[in-house]
Image: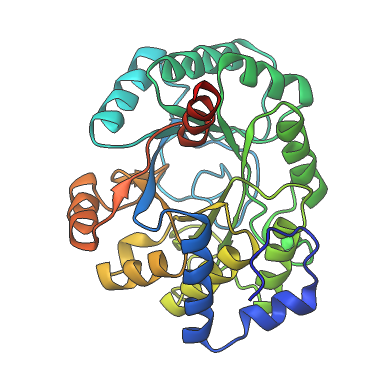
Amino acid sequence: MQSAIRTNWTLEEIYEIYNSPLLELVFRAANIHKKFNDTAEVQVCTLLSIKTGGCVEDCAYCPQAARYNTGVNVHALMKKDEVLSYAQKAKDAGSTRFCMGAAWREVRDNRDFDRVIEMVKGVNEMGMEVCCTLGMLTETQAQKLADAGLYAYNHNLDTSSEYYDHIITTRTYDDRLQTLDNVRKAGVSVCCGGIIGLGETHEDRIKMLHTLSTMPEHPESVPINALVAIAGTPLANNDKVDVWDMIRMIATARILMPKAMVRLSAGRTSMSVSEQALCFMAGANSIFAGDKLLTTPNPSFEEDDAMFQLLGLKPRVAFKEEKALVEEITN
């Protein structure tokens, strides 16, 4: 069984993995997961919308796009103290990574960005891994965030390069890849995955996984989202994603990127505990906790705590790899 970390996967290889019989696929993924990770450990992340709605982009799935009437109210950038209060609540509930999202097309060098820098510093000082998702970034902006203590930056590919124009026309696939490159150059951990249920084909999913798994370095975190269809968006009437498709995506991602945190992200509210358990078995080892993912519903901390107790899961500690490295050096 091949389980070395590779960045030279071919489309044919990924097609064969993705289309293998489901139970065989899950078994293979579970073995690779066990070899590279603590299978009882799940990274618990909390995502807060620090600036909501009014976005100029046309992402077809997004309730925060100004051009769609989705009932999402526009809120200006939150105050630092408010954000830190949310971060403390998340930490007290067991989260070790706090992600701040702003509905911007790109980061601008202005007072709002300066305020986000201060938020990053504040969350970092609390001992949490701090993540941001703010849209496109220049290399200089990425470096400023890194200097403030940013641990990770989320910027999803969403889908394959071929299907991308069906979902977004206000920025290109290359724009996304450039931002990821800027983040990597700044020494910040990359969080990058996609969404299934956008109307894409299985081939599009395979191509997206190919793009992720053939990057010079795999993203440290790979969120797999199921579309949450929101009234008022162009994808409002899309069919609900089949749980077996989620499991197939997670298992394939785990095989291709053995050490990545594969995050079971949007769509968990419609999944039973047993369905989520299969996702963990297939290699998922990260979730978003808290009752909202930006503007869409998510299971509560209490529900997730009960699930962790039932399945014998434990939250991954913050900065685990860095702490292990320090321990190794000092010993």
What residue lies at 26% left-to-right and 67% top-to-bottom? 273
Using the image as rendered, state which of residue 267 and residue 51 is in the foreground: 267
What residue lies at 30% left-to-right and 43% top-to-bottom? 290
Percent position of residue 254, x then y: 56, 64
Position above or below: 238 against 121: below
Quadrant in the rendering for residue 316: top left
- 21 with respect to 88 (left or right): right
Percent position of residue 158, x then y: 63, 56
Q: Is residue 237 visible?
A: no
Using the image as rendered, state which of residue 61 and residue 28 is in the foreground: 28
Quadrant placement of the N terminus: bottom right
Using the image as rendered, state which of residue 133 and residue 123 is in the foreground: 123
Position above or below: 199 against 319: below
Percent position of residue 120, x then y: 50, 19
Extreme residue toward the bottom, this view:
21
- 141 with respect to 27 (left or right): right
Q: How is the image coloured?
A: rainbow
Position above or below: 56 against 263: above
Quadrant in the rendering for residue 188: top right
What residue lies at 67% left-to-right and 53% top-to-bottom? 157
Percent position of residue 276, x then y: 34, 66
What is the total number of numbered labels drawn onto the structure image? 0
Q: Is residue 24 visible?
A: yes
